[in-house]
Amino acid sequence: MSWIAGTIQTLRVAREVSPYGYFLTDGESEVLMHYTELVGKKPKLEDEVEVFLYFDTEDRIAATMKKPYLTLGQMARLKVADVHPRLGCFLEIGLGRQLLLPLSELSEKVEYRPLPGDEVHVVLGHDKAGRLLATLAGEDEIGPLVFDAPASWRNQWVEGWVTKSLQMGSFVLVDGGVVGFGVYGLIPAPERTRPLRLGERISGRVTFIREDGRVNLSMAKLKQEGRVEDADRILAFLNERPGGGMPYSDESPAEAIKQRFQISKSAFKRAIGKLMREGLVTQRGSWTYLSEKAPGTGASLDDADSVLDSEKPSAPRSEE
């Protein structure tokens, strides 16, 4: 027969060759099982053993009694053991060796790529030479296994694994628990608080349940909850600033606010509005300042003005 890597076969022990191991046969051809690939007691001649076929480090077909996490054509979630900038990710497969998820399967954006410890959903396949290779599990593999999200999930926080990250958003397989395999979801880009890696474990809030049973998610809390948290973050930032002032206000660009506070401009305005109603901050032009009522501040507006002057770009000198 033609040996196919990634399959499990029941073979007969034909002979032992020291110091290498055992040659196994299907009655027509033989394959080597190294001593290091034994599990349990040593087999005897003519014993039948169940083995997994793979390519060894010298690209020769070989057999092992160790059980892999998946076989040819199957899908599984595998942990990233290592990352190579030119080759891709190496995944734990349960055999004491790693499986390559090639660079061609990963995003061009480095921030979307997995790191060691992340877990990715992949399918076991072959490269052109018949060697084992992982490919990312997509809609065709994951879709038939998921279940429809129940209506009770609306506004609930759930956890899951990122299965793909794109510019427009990140796809997530939400945990199913005892109910089933899971629920397919999407975190649209505006609802991400930061770039999400493939294989990253995340928490998200269910914002919408679609007719097809899938969900939209957000990494942000409900407005009333997030407003308090965002206001505390802004207040802490102001307290750390010399003079208690910052060059951010309702007039600031959304991109600048996102970069500094990891929140949207609308969330920033809600938080600033809360602090202003409580008399903790004031705004002057494009700057926001701590008021004397704010806890932990001894800064005056004169101090803030000096900081403002120091952070303004100096006017170019004219040449005589």
Image: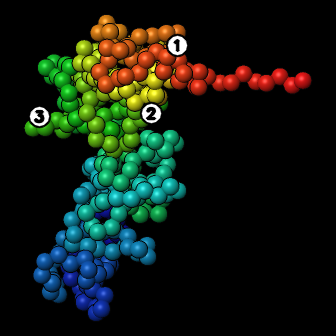
Whether residue 12 is visible: yes
What is the spatial separation of the Cα atoms under label 3 and label 2, in whole angstroms? 28 Å
| Vertical order, 3 against 127 (above or below) | below
Amino acid residing under circle 2: Leu
Amino acid residing under circle 1: Ser
The residue that disc 2 covers is 166
The residue that disc 1 covers is 286
Q: Position of residue 149 (x, y in %)?
A: 19, 25
x 25%, y 25%: residue: 205
Quarter where residue 25 is shown: bottom left
Q: Residue furthest right?
A: 320
x 36%, y 54%: residue: 116
What is the spatial separation of the Cα atoms under label 3 and label 1, in whole angstroms? 52 Å
What is the spatial separation of the Cα atoms under label 1 and label 2, in whole angstroms? 34 Å
Q: Nearer the viewer, residue 289 or 131?
A: 289
The residue that disc 3 covers is 179
**Foreground disc of the pair 1, 2:** 1
Badge 3 or badge 2: first in the primary sequence: 2
Query: Do the residues under discs 1 and 2 have CB atoms within 8 angstroms?
Result: no
| Vertical order, 56 against 102 (above or below) | below
